[in-house]
Amino acid sequence: MSAAREMPEPALLPPDAPARARLSLSGISCIYGGFTAVDQLNLDIVPGEFVSLLGPSGCGKTTTLRMIAGFVRPTAGTISMDGAIISAPGAVLAPERRQMSMIFQSYAIWPNMTVAENVAFGLKLRRLGREDVRVKVATMLDTVRLGKLADRYPAELSGGQQQRVALARAMVIQPRVLLLDEPLSNLDANLREEMRFEIRRLHDTFKFTTVYVTHDQGEAMVTSDRIAVMNAGKIEQIDPPYLLYTRPRTRFVAGFIGRTNLMEGECGGTEVRFDGFALPRVMFAEGETAQQGRVTFSVRPQSIGLRHNPSEAGRAQCTTPGRLLERAFLGETWDYVVAPEGSGLRLKVATLPFQVFEVGDPVWLEFDPAQMAAIGKGE
Amino acid sequence: MARTGAARPRVLRRVEPSTVAWLAALAALLFLVAVPVAKVVISSFQDTDTGAFTWNNYAVAYGHVRDYASLGTSLLYAAEVTVASIIIAVPIAWGVARTDMPCKGLVRAFVLGAFITPPYLGAIGWILLAGPNAGWINKVWMAVTGDAHGFVNVYSFGGLVVVTALYAFPYIFVFTADALERVSSEMEEAARILGAGHLRTILRVTLPLVTPAILGGAIVVFLDTVALFGTPAIIALPARIKVMTLVLWQFFEFPVRAEAAAAYAVPLVLITVTLFAAQRAILGRRGYVALTGKGGSRTLLQLGRWRWAIFGYAMLMVALSVLLPYAALAHAAFSRAWGRGFSLANLTLDNFKYLLLTDPAARLTIVHSFGYSAATACLAVALALCVAYIVSRRLVRHTAVLTALCMAPLVIPGIVLAIGFYSAWAPPPLALYGTAALLVFGFTARFLPIAYTNCMASLRSLNPEMEEAVRILGGSQLRAVTRVVVPLLKTSLIGSWLLVFIPATRELSTAIFLVGSNTRVISVMMLDLSENGSFETLAALGFFLLGVTILIVLAGYKLLGRDFMLRRS
């Protein structure tokens, strides 16, 4: 109704055509009245891949998703699906022509239709026979374990069940791209944990090309093939979950994914000098100390060991004395704050519950340079 | 509770103050609502003179075929008005709530204008516009086409329906717009991404989602129309269309047969109660109101050029409802004789002068109207706040009884309530006939549901911990109410007061039965003026009432925000 120029309209795909799409966002920007929500973002998603957009609120992840869906028009850049442009500043293919489906934060389950009617909606639009629709709906409801609730109205379902209806409704049409907008944010903690695995299980079953928006790193970790960490309208880093955690590449990513210590070091000839101690350069992972001069490293609290005396430590060249300043017992770990001797650093160290130290104790810190990740030039 | 035998601390009072408040409220509600309603039912079985049991009243009331016919006419009338109101209201509500239609504030202001226009005043305006031959529209038609007769006639069933609908549609507008504003855009987007276009999304998702709201508004309109007295008195009576309310009124012409009227009214109550039950059943298990999850954001549909089409439709409707009738009324109000057309010689302020200065009776009537309405608003809000507080804080058991009594006048047609009031309190022992008290109590009962729903809504928004903090620091319940609840709810209580005051200044169907020769009010005076054909004075009075109402509404806007009248409550 509002498109400046009409896009050619593809027919709706029959729901058994297994056409997982490749999705490419190139130079996509979105500016709302002076505010840059998304800033020249590039993203390539291969067919069948599960990519999460992860970031704090206001980072532009939902806007990006809504541009992919066709609800928001990009200010600059293009989005293409299997090589065909579907969004550009001048013309946008209507959402209903994209053969995608989406799961909304509010689920948006229509309360005036039963569970089965909700799920059948998209199939009926594709002009399937009545019997065909019935079978597909029943099969999908069984897949999401809602088979017995087909004739209920949404108001009679729990939050988790409504969530499954939303999943079934989105997946039953075999979308070329499946979009999820913070789908678990309305569930309580236990259910949220369970649904993460459910979503991944369903992805392993159907292998839809999937874009998942969340601010919860645990969700992204469990579900995704790759995670794109977003900040201020840009992607800071996109990598598989393991790499993202162990090798963060920016200060923001290191701080956003898990907890970390930022330590500034000076890369010299054979060692990397930190404030108050030095570590041998050869023990760092390949490439981490390629830069000369000042470099900031991200050091995870659980990658630092804590010992009562130096003889317990494995590698003498990686240990340094310190003093314990604070502690807190969290059940699964002890959280300590330790100051290395002769250093201004205050390091967070996490140990197993049975490794007990008292505040004020002299301790030995043991570093593992192989687990340290360079996140860019120091200041 | 302390066990028997154990020393009971002195500070434990036997009579809680809340019990006293509860008993007082219950007594007031019995007086205002329960007794009059019961009186209608009982007196319908009583002989006029002896008071003995009889079926005779029903024989008198339904003795003729034409009496059944007027029942049918009333139902048909109400049904057609309901349909017409839906056709007027729903597109406007959709345009305002979900699209980028231009000038939404203007459209809302005119809908509010239709809302605060007393239906009988609008009907007078339409007589001036569409009276056969003399109406402005017909005059223009005859001048343009050279036809010897006009082409619209307000004195017809169709005219009656349209003129009624033009002032009834705001109810449906309010219900529908409110519901549309609460439908999350994600509901529509979910349909779009699954492959549905704009039109299909509206028809399959948006409209079904607000159907219960439309039905809710429709039932209000239907009930209001069945019980409507003013518009039929002005249009249907000359057109010889007999609706129930007119028949009821005729039972009160000399000789007054209140018992027969009661018998005639009982089916009316049954209809309204049935409809109310039907509405409850329709809303049943689908639980439409429960919108799931978070994310209730609403993005407006970009209509492009079509936004002017929907705007045009809205403006046409408010022109028919507000602009044209008021233009005709304005002309009459400033004319020596409205039929003489536009000329300087015909221009005068005499009509206003007559009302406000020359005629002491007219002046007294105006003072009565505002005085009674103010008293009504104070009584209704005080009683409603008291009951709402008891109910919402669960101070006593069986609060459902209190709620039912407060809300009953919503279901009982105003005209029936008035007959009950007349039967119960006009004769001895209280012998209130002809007193201001009878009118004020009648109005209070009529508008109690408005005050009650508003007070309940505002109390619900108030965290009870505010009051518990007073109690734990040593303050009494009464102090908690007077020092915390009332000050915090001050603006919303003023809002409730206005929402009772404004309709009370124009209430006709209750007044017509309860008014005495010394307690005449504006609405009754307007009806008399219309019967005499004094449209000029009538229009001037209408304008005066409108002016005062606009001032009050503006004050309300300033105090309570833009939406205080067009809210769903």
Image (cartoon, rainbow, N blue to C red):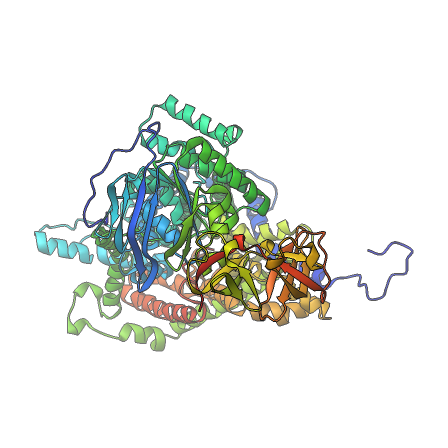
Q: For residue A46, say whether it is visible.
A: yes
Which sits in the foreground, A45 or B179? A45
Q: Residue furthest right?
A: B5
Q: In this figure, what is the number of numbered marks?
A: 0
Q: Residue furthest front?
A: A269
Quarter of the N terminus of chain B within the rendering: bottom right
Q: Residue furthest left?
A: B146
B110 sits to left or right of B290: left
B248 sits to left or right of A12: right
The answer to whether B80 is drawn above or below residue B121 in the figure is above
| Residue A122 in picture, x, y percent from top left | 36, 34
Residue occupying the point 28% across, 50% down: A26
Q: For residue B423, say whether it is visible.
A: no
The answer to whether B548 is drawn above or below residue A129 in the figure is below
Q: Residue furthest top?
A: A131
Which sits in the foreground, B490 or B329? B490
| Residue A125 in picture, x, y percent from top left | 32, 32
Residue occupying the point 43% across, 28% down: A137
Quarter-of-image position of residue B308: bottom left
| Residue A30 in picture, x, y percent from top left | 31, 56
Quarter-of-image position of residue B503: bottom left
| Residue A180 in picture, x, y percent from top left | 42, 44
Which sits in the foreground, A1 or A166? A166
